[in-house]
Image: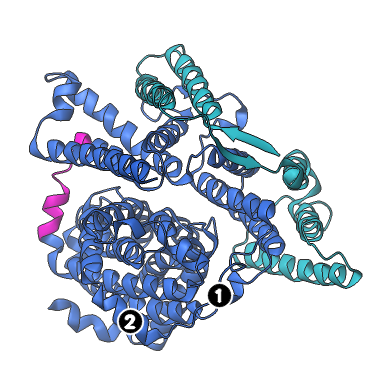
Amino acid sequence: MEFLSYFSNVFTFTNLLILFLGTVGGLLMGAAPGLSPTMAVALLIPFTFKMSPEQGLIMLGAVYTSTVAGGAISAILLKIPGAPANIATVMDGYPMAKAGKPKEALHYCFISSFIGGVIGIFILIFFTPVLAGFALKFGPSHMFWIAIFGVTVIATLDSNSIIKGLFSGAIGLWLATIGYDSVLGVERFVFNPIFSGGINIIAALVGLFAIPQVLSMLESKQNISDQFEMEKRSLSQSVLYNISRIKALTVGSISGVIIGLIPGAGGQIAGLVSYDQIKKISKNKENFGKGEPDGIIAAESANNAMVGPSLVPLLTLGVPGSPTAAVLLGGLLIHGMFPGSNLFTVYAETTWTFIDSLLIAQLMMLVFGLYISGLAKYVIKTPANYMAAAITILAIFGTYSVQHNFADVIVMLFLGVSMFFLSKFGFTAAPIVLGLILGPIAETNFTQAKIIADTQNGIFSYLTSGPLNLTIISLCIISITYGFITEMKKKKND
Amino acid sequence: MIEIKNLTTVIITLILSILLAFVSFTGGASEAYLFPKIITSTMIILSSLSLLFYFFEKNQIIAKIDMIKLSVYLILIILFILFGEIVGFYFSATLIFLTVCYYYSENKATKIIVYNLLVTVFFMLFIYFLFSVLLKVQVPRFFLL
């Protein structure tokens, strides 16, 4: 119970002010397309340099937790995930908003984010030493299969045709190979100099989700709320309903905790895996993708439950559990704090104050998030032409701000317009984005696996042996088979 | 209005897969292209499967695209790609915002034009505050804009 003795450190005026600014700023940054949690934390690191280590980490932790939740605001209201972690939230969040229930969808999002987030931080507090050992069991072959599993899950979930879904995932994996090969340094598929640095993930995320949405709005000239009545929903109704969805909350939180512990996996996989799992065990399978609250609850509790555990391997071994945790490592290092046992002995006060502040940040995220939910109707009722123009400008500036590179903006617009036409052919953006995100993880681990396998029985044997490999491969096969069966059933019914 | 049939989709995916596989298999250093080769081979298998499934389905129209309606937006995007860096982000973004608001509005009365101008000014001030003041992003500029 060491963590309790440092709680008083959080409740100083300066630390509470930093928490407040970090939480509100994080929610707004998360909601803006293009400003992901990783980028928000990276942008703030130089500002925290002049703060004390304790204050700097409190600021970064608050921004990390609230940007993950804030990303759901644009996912639900505009069908544009604010961050990769919110891709699964789009699937049921946007249909709910379209059906006149944006406030309700945002309530579920923040309440489940809070519950998942608190569970994740308690895991961080109580199980850090035990779980650090589990994270070490994941080798290159397992990470390769985890990445493939992530792509197969989204391909089966976010598409009417499983073949088109898998094909989209493959396009994403291929796009990730553009640029320099990270192991051999060979230039690949650089048809034009603007591609020499590869495809920036944020540029792709913004382009693939924002621009097709803009083009659809302009083509139909309809506001999101045009055909629907806006609902009146009280907070107490949402809280009671949310708490009653124990199954979705449990599935989301457990998936988030497990995936958060796996180095490099990140919130995008947590959200998708939990969405997939809850859809499979739900009695209302046919409602998923049409505005099923369980879809939002599972996805959002998972991506916030992932935050705490993703810091476990970071704080104990120096191995980040998510891309944002990797940037947070930079925040620790600039204050001279190196991951390992020293953090809980020499720097115990700073470390525990930081972990305690994450709990308070969750509470602040819930309060301010719910307040923002009340303003959702204004976004939804904005005329389509204003919304389309605003999204385009935000997408351009947001993408440029990532690397100060005009080529990223060109890539974003090119991918966006292409995605609009691809969507008309029946392809969806989510598998492409996830393929692009997981592509480097899959390829690096595949190359490492091949180097190890060359000294053993060959790559095939290395990738398919061991209980952990076989479990993940089975999950991939189950995911694809389930997708095929569902598609066949749907076609039969039609 | 352009109509899209599912045969078009199948043919495009097949051609795309073959092209990408060709580039991957003739790319050079075999170790660096191993992963792309696996992916593009998978793409060929998937597009061949969709061709196979096509024969069990009717050649139906799956979507329509209203190119005339979208042409103004697409032209604005092309102009931005060509001249955005030269004329500056704030100047070009203001023009894009104004044009989209005006062209895609059903009501083109003078009052609406003035309203559009006001919305554009406030929105661009918000963008300037967020990116240039708060986040210190140095975007390409033309004179003062």
Q: Chain A's shade in the image?
A: blue
- How far across and down, in percent of the image, does residue A186 sit? 44, 22
Which stretch appears magenta? A130-142
Q: Please state if A379 lies on the left or on the right of A257 as rendered.
A: right
Residue under the image location 51 percent in, 58 percent down: A79
Distance of mark 2 from mark 1, alpha carbons? 22 Å
Q: Nearer the viewer, residue B66 or B36?
A: B66
Mark earlier in primary sequence (2, 1):
1
Classed neighbour count for the residue bearing mark 1: other residues with Cα under 10 Å, few (<14), some (14–19), many (≥20): few
- How far across and down, in percent of the image, does residue A43 sit? 50, 59
Q: Please state if B99 lies on the left or on the right of A436 as rendered.
A: right
A400 over A16 or under it: above or below? above
- Residue A169 in which image quadrant: top left
A51 over A298 or under it: above or below? below
**Figure colour scheme:** by chain
Residue A239, which numbered label? 2
Q: Nearer the viewer, residue A392 or A266?
A: A392
* Residue A281 is at least partly visible in this image: yes
Disc 1: which residue = A229
Q: Are marks 2 and 1 on the same chain?
A: yes
